[in-house]
Structure formats: C-alpha cells, structure tokens
Amino acid sequence: MARYDAYLHRLKVTAAAKMIPAEDFADARYDETEETQTTDVMILLSTPRSGSTLLCELIRENHGYTAHEYFQPFQYMPLLADRWNCHSDGTIDGAAYIRALRRHRTHKNGWLGINLHGNHLPYFSSIERYLGDLRVHYVRLRREDQIAQAVSFEIAMQSRRWSNHFDSKAQAKYSFRRTLRMLEVIRNQNTVIQSFLAERRVPYRDLTYECLVARPEETLRSLPGIPPDHLLSVTPRLCRQANGQSEEWTRKFISDVLDDQFNADKDLGGLLQLRQRLKLRRLRVT
C-alpha cells in the first residue's frame, strides 16, 4: 500500500509540474533564500474566481510575502511537499509541511500568507495548531456577483486557463447545468468559510472582488500589516480574464434561469429564489 501511495504521489507531482506555469507562486523562485522567524500570518479565506490570486500578487508587490494556495490538495500541496521533502511514501507530514512552509515562505519582515478556498479548510484545520505561536490575521474575500463568478469558474475549469500565465488550447463550451453546479460549489464554500470563522469567533477583514478591482489602493491599505504611508503599486502582472465570452455566458445563464431551463427535482435547491431575485433585478423602479 505504501508503495502504491508513493506511486500516486509521484504521478500527482509529475502532472502538477507539467501543468503549473513558471510564473505561478508555487515555483521555487519564490522560496525565500534566507530563513526568518515567522511572527505574523495572514489567512485569506476565498473561493475560486473571487480575485484572490490578484490580491496575493498585489500583497507580494507591496508587502513582500508570497501568499498562495498552499493547502490546495490537487497540485500545490503534492508539488511543494515533494520539493520541501515533507512526505513519506506519498503521505504528507503535516508538521514537517508547516515547518517547511514557514521556512521557505516567511518574508524577511516576518510575515507569511496563506490563501485558503473553502475546500482547502479541512486540510488546513488538521494542522493549523502548528501556527499557534503566531499573530493570526484573517481576511475574507468574496465576490458579490456570484453568477459572473460561477461563469468564470466554469470557463477556467474547461479551458484550464486559471490565469493568463496558463498555456492551454482547450475551448470552453457553455452548459447551463455545469455553470449551475459551479454556482452551487461557490455557495457551499462560502458556507464552509462562514462556519470556520464563526467557530473561531475571530475578527476578520471583509473584502469584495468588486472593491478590489475598482479601488485596489484602498483595498490594500485596509489589509493588516500595510504601513499607512507606504507608496503602493497597483499594477499587477495578471490580466483580467473577463471578456466577451464570459459576458455572453452570464447573459445566457440568467436567461436560462428566467426561462425555467431547469429541473426543480435535480437542480440547485435555491434556484427558485435565485430566479425571483433576477426577475426583481429586471424591474424598473422609479
């Protein structure tokens, strides 16, 4: 069994290395060259296509530390655990992984950043005790327009282009039910995140994607650890991926919802309420 687990781990690492571009923050070039004692950790709670990668890039540009999806179990955790030698026969050693994360990703200012989607929380929760000696700062990032977020999520899933750095020729094809499924995933992850925060009864900074895009400097200045007089850079490497395709899909999805293109027994439980809200959105109010 151990040999089989090691084989699966090697397959994951090989596939991840082929898929993840060199510009991604998982690359070894973003490992810190010198060891620094960790004093603070910023926990960013987000969902797919909520702007978390953009925010992490702006944080690195302005505050130095490299926040990333270190507990994403499909590519990033296996890849990093392999490079940092934190696994045995394919099983990741949680304590060793946290030690390595602190060693390789703590910036010289003492800060570490972790970007957690809702589905990463079970992995993080099992080993978060190893961060108990740090000052922990929670930030929640959410997207108000969840339909546009679900469309972006589905396009990225099909095309495999999670940012403009990913090189993929795959073409995305509109599907009402697949987009609906992405909307359900986003809502479920938001529920998990809210439960996570409620259980810990911790204060957190609440941000939105819409504010980040419209007022990036204001958003950055609201984050913990950013000096109020620091001159900020708000020009990221990443390009916005919203385009005519995503706008067309959003319009089509809303139209399909309003036209009853769903099965009440099979589709999302709250879809009737969603349809009602969309109808209200179309009303002219004077």
Image: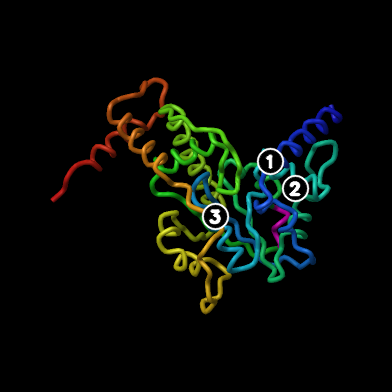
Q: Position of residue 162 (x, y in %)?
A: 56, 44
Label 1 sits on a secondary structure element that is loop
Q: Which residue is mark 1?
A: 75
Contact (Cβ within 8 Å) of mark 3 with mark 1: no
* Amino acid type, callout 2: Leu
Q: What stretch of residues is rendered in magenta?
A: 129-133
The quadrant in which the N terminus is found is top right
| View extreme (bottom): residue | 229
> In the image, is 238 to the left or to the right of 247?
right
* Amino acid type, callout 1: Gln
Residues 237 and 141: in front is 237
State the separation of the CA atoms marked 3 and 2. 22 Å
Which is closer to the viewer, label 3 or label 2?
Answer: 3
* Amino acid type, callout 3: Leu
- Label disc, if present, on residue 80 of the rendered structure: 2
- Label disc, if present, on residue 285 of the rendered structure: none
Structure colour scheme: rainbow
